[in-house]
Amino acid sequence: MTRASRGSGRVQQACLNVASVVGALAILWFLLSLLLGWSLVLFKTGSMAPTYPTGAAAVAVPVAADEIEPGDVVTVPRAAGGLPVTHRVVSVADPGTGDGARELVLKGDDNATQDLEVYTVTGADRVVVGAPYVGYAVTLLAQPKTLAILTTVVAALTVWVFWPRDEDDADGEPEQAEDGATQSDGLAPAGTTVGSAPGTTRAMLREGLRPPPTTHERPT
């Protein structure tokens, strides 16, 4: 196997490994979202900095309202509609409605004052883990142009990885001559007379031995 073939094989294996990991993570996230209701929160403003600055992303899991405690970071809908808000819980109160609802007072970590609205919820998405800058990558990947480019690249890599290679070149086997014999196996090509060398025959006659018969290929 040539050095170029070995290098190409390593690159192909690396591409397969990366694709396998990405595919496994995508399937895992799909299942968690579908079965457990996990969601991805993108922080587009700096109201939760420095914990979750602009461009950060976090994973949130659904919880009942009676599980929410002060200090939790939760995502709740606004009464007026629009995008939900993700802020830290300052206080939790029971409105006494008997349906498990809670009144939440929220505040952004970087905001000077609490939110004006008091959020009455029966459940919310509680942030469990987050990371900076991931939101930028997610936003970029969600763009149609980016998806088109990634689709093209993945398709090209798939074709390249699974494209059949020359087995002789890949395994390092010697090339065969046109008559079927290899160049390095030490065999005479088909149709060549095989027999003892003249000197060998004379030496055998002096020793009283019978030389082996000379054979010829029958022409076809």
Image: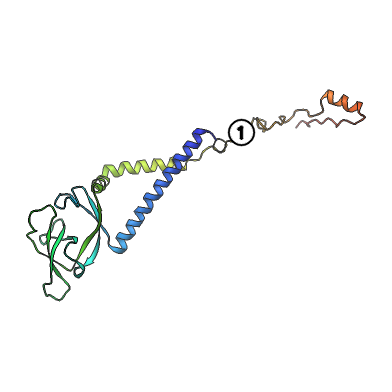
Q: Residue at x 31, y 41 (%)?
A: 149
In the image, residue 12 sits, relative to residue 192, either above or below, namely: below
Mark 1 nearby-residue class (10 Å; few <14, some 14–19, many ≥20):
few
Q: Please say if 14 is above or below 210.
A: below
**As displayed, is residue 150 above or below residue 4?**
below
Quarter of the rendering containing residue 173: top right
> Up-down: is 202 above or below 123?
above
**Apparent side of residue 165 relative to residue 198 in the rendered image (left or right):** left
Q: Is residue 114 left or right of residue 164?
A: left
* Quadrant position of residue 204: top right
In front of the other: 165 or 53: 53
Q: Residue at x 35, y 41 (%)?
A: 152
Name the residue at the right extreme. 208
Quarter that holds the C terminus: top right
At which x and y percent is residue 102? 14, 69
What amino acid is found at the position of numbered circle 1 in the picture?
Pro
- Which residue corresponds to the image point at 28% horizontal and 42% vertical from the top-left? 146
Q: Secondary structure at mark 1?
A: loop
Instruction: Residue at 27% x, 60% y: name it.
Output: 38
Q: Position of residue 25 (x, y in %)?
A: 35, 53
Nearest the viewer among 101 and 146 is 101
**Residue 59 percent location from the top left of the image:** 26, 56
Residue hosting label 1: 174
